Image: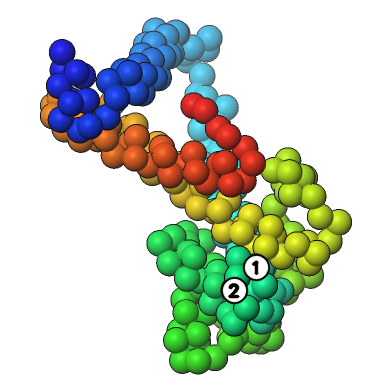
Amino acid sequence: VFLRECSSLLQIEERSLISELNKIRMAKSKKENYSSQSSSQQPSYPDEPPPDLHQEPNSASVADTDENQEKEIIRLLLNYGHELVHWDGITDTYIAPYVISNLADVEFENPECRLMIAEYKEKLEAGELPSDQDFIKHANRQIADMTISLVSSPYVLSENWYAKRKIFVKDEKENLRATILGGIFHLKKRKVDHILKSIRDEIQHEADEVNQAILMRRYLQVKEVEKGISQFLGSVIVK
C-alpha cells in the first residue's frame, strides 16, 4: 500500500519503485548477514596480535577513485585544448572551453587536476587559451610533473577502453569527437555512480517512509541520467 501511494504521489510506476526498493533491501540484507557471520567467527590465534597490527592503512585504491578519469580530461585539454571543435554543427569554439563548459557541474577530487581546471577557467574567462607550456613551466612542481607525464602519455584510461565502447580509432586524432566526448561522459558516469551509491546508502538507513519515497524518486531520476550516459558510451548497464 505504501509503495502504491508513493507511486501515485510521485508519478512513478509502482513496479519501478518495487524493483529498486527490493534491490536495495537485498543488498542491505546481504551486508547484514555478512557482518553477522564475520562477528560470530572466532580468530584462530586469539592470544597473538594480528599480522597487520603495525601495518600502515592502505590509501584508497586508484580503481575506487576518479583519478584516472580526471587525469584523462587534463590530458585531453593539454593535447587538444587549442584545436577547434568540428562536430555537431560547432565550428567556432576551441576544445578547451568546450570541455570546461561541459564539465561545469563536475567537481574534481584530485588536487592537481582541481587546480588545473580552476586555472583553465580563470584564463578562459580572461580571454586566454592555456597551453601545455603554461603547466610544464608551472611553479607548482606537482602540476608540472603531472603535465609532463600526461603530455608524453598517449592515454590515461585503458588501451581497450574506447574499443570496449565501440569507439574504434587507430589514432584518437582521427575522431576527436569520440575521444573528447568519451572522456567527458566517462567522468560524468563515474560521478553519477557515486551519487547513486550515496542515495542507496541513505535509503538503507532511512526509517521514515515519506523520506524513503523522496529518496527513491531522486534515485530513479539519477538512474535515468546514468542510463543516458551509458547508452552514449555504448554500454547499457543494468544494476
Q: Quadrant of residue 205?
A: top left
- Tell me the residue at 79%/50% (across/down): 168
**Is residue 108 visible to the viewer in this orientation of the structure?**
yes
When the figure is inspected, residue 73 is found, relative to residue 205, above or below; the finding is below
Horizontal side of residue 146 vs 127, given as left or right: right
In-front residue for pair 137/24: 24
Residue 87's label in the rendered image is 1
The residue that disc 2 covers is 90
Q: CA distance from mark 1 to mark 2?
A: 6 Å
Picture disc at residue 131: none
The amino acid sitting under disc 2 is Ile
Q: Position of residue 153 (x, y in %)?
A: 78, 64
How far across and down, in percent of the image, does residue 111 sit?
50, 66
Inspect this view and state whether residue 147 appears.
no
Residue lying at the far bottom in this picture: please name it: 127
The 10 Å Cα crowd at callout 2, few under 14, some 14 to 19, many 20 or more, is few
Image coordinates for residue 83, horizontal then vertical, percent:
69, 79
Image point (51%, 61%), residue name? 110
> Residue at the location (44% across, 60% down)?
106
Q: Check the image and report above or below for 134 versus 105.
A: below
The quarter holding residue 4 reads top left
The quarter of the rendered structure image containing the N terminus is: top left
Question: Which of these two is toward me, 125 or 59?
Answer: 125
Mark 2: secondary structure: loop
The kind of residue tagged 1 is Trp
- In the depicted view, which residue is nearer to us: 70 or 55? 70
Mark 1 near mark 2, Cβ–Cβ under 8 Å?
yes
* Closer-to-camera residue (66/126): 126
